[in-house]
Every structure is written in structure tokens, then in C-alpha cells.
Amino acid sequence: MRVAVLISGGVDSAVAVHRLLEQGHDLHLFYIRIGLDTGEGDCSAEEDIEMCRYIAAKYSLPFDVVSLHEEYWENVMDYALRSVREGLTPNPDVMCNKMIKFGFFEERWGKEFDRTATGHYATTREIDGLTWLGTGVDRVKDQTDFLCRISYSQLSHLMFPIGELPKAEVRRIAIETRMPNAYRRDSQGICFLGKINYNDFIRRHLGEKPGPIIELETGRKLGTHRGFWFHTIGQRKGLGLSGGPWYVVKKNTHDNVVYVSQGYDTEKQYGSTLHLDEMHWLTRDPWGTDCDKVRITFKNRHTPEFLSAQLTRLSDSEYLIDSATPVQGIAPGQFAVIYTPDSSLCLGSGIITGRNIML
């Protein structure tokens, strides 16, 4: 097959290239540049591109750098900044996959190929003639939660060559094949920001608006924040308070108040019920109107842990998750990602609303 391979300069996508060639595919490598022409942020793009050129040269493969920075700003970053301004917790990586990597790229370049491949730790499964998103063998590295909003047509066009490998095996292959990035560290954080501090980025676009930090249980003012948009539910670091640990447990965006609670195990950090809206199923709705306390597992953040729960359909797009164990830091705007009870398939996701019931 003719395969477009999205590479990043990291070890995962490099090993994906190696495995696809072993399988006999005809490859064309692409690097998506999403930073500004000014060079702001862009995840150290020049270093990444140089590494990608090494990989292309090593295997004598065609390689192109394609620019989608305007599309990224108009869609992903606009969504992220709008969400933060509204007091929500966005996930730019989820929207980047949906709108940029498998959206604009597919429409302009990927559609010319039989498949598009990436270095995500995920798999695809063919069941009853349909394509389903499967979790990666390495549960610690599993990245299906970042793919939870893509469309069925996007999913059907994707390949994940390293999804059936543990990370240690990926590293071993990279070292054995003398990849130039074999020992390169995995990237962390929001890719676009590169070396830019997140709070500096938010300050640049949303400014500052000082307001009180209040202890939820007593109503006592503990300090002053610089704007509720710098803080998210479940946050511990960056509050500047003594006598902690202190956790952000609630925000009043109308009055610009951040509420905190003290202690590692304060019950105010936890909830057991998650209200979801804008439900999106990757392949199809598994239950339809029969979705009443069905067994699932789920994630509400990127973590190796899959939590057991029951899922109930309230309306066409509204659902309710009842978690079997308390969930720390339930933040409106996050994606709750739905899996089968054995966590082998990622079924879809909903957006957590502000209606969640705290313990």
C-alpha cells in the first residue's frame, strides 16, 4: 500500500517507519508544521525537522514539510483559549488530531494515499466488517484518549504500526537499527508551546485579572490569584499558598473566585458522578436507547488507569457516568473517554459539564 506517514522527529514515529517498510509498504514521510512563521513556540521545529530528514535519508524515502499553522490557530488554539476563558479545561491534543492531523492534512495530502500512519500507541480492530479503535498493548503509553473525537472515516484510513509493541521494545528496535533519535526523550506538554511557559502564553492572550483564593469549607480568603483561567480543577502546584497541600476544587468564573481545599485526601477533590454532553461515538453507538447502567471503563485525563463505571443515556447527546471509585479533579471541559469493560476498545467520548455531583 501507499502510506503517508506523519513523523515528528521522535523515536515512536521513526520506528513506525521501520516497521511499515518491513511490511513492504510504499512510504512518503510528512512533518506537519503548526508554529508561526515568526518561530514562536513550534515545539523546537527546526530540530525536529532535521531529525525527520535523517530518518528519510536513512531509508531513502521522500519527505515533505507541510504547514498548517493558520489552520491550527484558527481551530485548535481558538478552541483552547475560548475554553480557558470560559473556565473550562480544554485538551488541544485531542482537537489537533481531529482537525489538523486527520482533518486538514487528510483533505489536502493524505487522501492521495491508501492509508495514513502515525506513531500513536493505539491499534485498530476489524469486527463484523467495521473498524474499531483498540487500545495499545502498552497501557502506560496508550494514546487512544487523544484519538477519542476523530470520525469513523478518519479512523478507517489510519494505521498504528507500533500499537502492538511496548515502549521498551520500540526503544530496543530504535537502538538495534541505529536510529539517530534512539535515545531522544519523549516530548511533554502542549506541542505548540515548545519552550514557552504555559502561564506566560495564557497571560499573553488573556491578560491578568486578580481575584481571591478562598478556602471552600470556611470561606476564608487565603490569597490572590491573577485570573481564574490560570487554574484548573484538581490543580495543586502554582497557587502560592503556604500550609498546604492545597487543591483547586471549584471556580466561580462570574465573580473570578478560585476555591481551594486543604490536604492530600480532602473529599472535596473527588466526585463519583460525571455528566457528559456532546457524546461522540467513533464507530457506532453500541447501545442506542438501551444504554441504562451499562458496564464500561473510562478515563477523564491522560493516565494509564482505566476506571470502572456504569453509563446511562439521558438524551440524544447527554450521558451520565457513575464511577465505581471516587474520581479526582473532575473538570468541566475535559473529555471523558469511554471504553469497553475490559478496556480493549475505545468507543467514544463526551465532554464533562459543570453539573457534576461532588461527594
Image: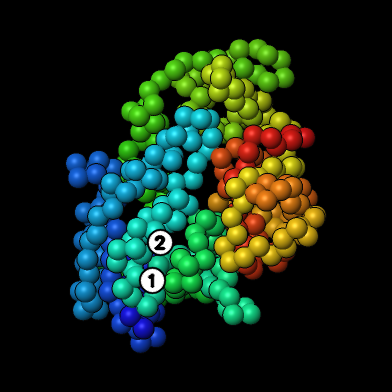
Q: Label 1 is placed on what type of residue?
A: Thr
Q: Is residue 224 visible?
A: no
The extreme right residue here reads 293
Q: Residue at x 44, y 71 (%)?
A: 158
Q: Secondary structure at mark 2?
A: helix
Q: Is residue 213 above or below residue 342?
A: above
Q: Position of residue 269 (x, y in %)?
A: 68, 34
- Please tell me how crowded label 2 is: few (under 14), some (14-19), or many (20+) other residues with Cα within 10 Å: many
Residue 60 located left or right of residue 21: left
Using the image as rendered, state which of residue 29 and residue 311 is in the foreground. Answer: 311
Is residue 124 something that shows in the picture? yes
Where's residue 326, x and y in %?
74, 43
Q: Is residue 225 left or right of residue 110?
A: right
Q: Earlier in the sequence, mark 1 or mark 2?
A: 2
For the residues bearing labels 1 and 2, Cβ distance under 8 angstroms: yes
Q: Nearer the viewer, residue 2 or 196?
A: 2
Can you identify the residue that label 2 sits on?
Answer: 102
How far across and how far down the image is residue 222, in percent?
59, 15
Is the N terminus in the top left, top right, bottom left or bottom right quadrant?
bottom left
Does 114 appear above or below 88? below
Residue 291 in which image quadrant: bottom right
Q: What residue is rendered at 37% in x and 78% in y?
A: 114
Q: How is the image coloured?
A: rainbow
Q: CA distance from mark 1 to mark 2?
A: 8 Å
Name the residue rendered at 21%, 79% in the picture.
60
Give the residue pinned by disc 1. Answer: 116
**Residue at figure coordinates x 48%, y 72% from the top left:** 156
Amino acid type at mark 2: Phe
Left/right placement of residue 255 relative to residue 13 reads: right
- Residue 112 x %, y %: 31, 73
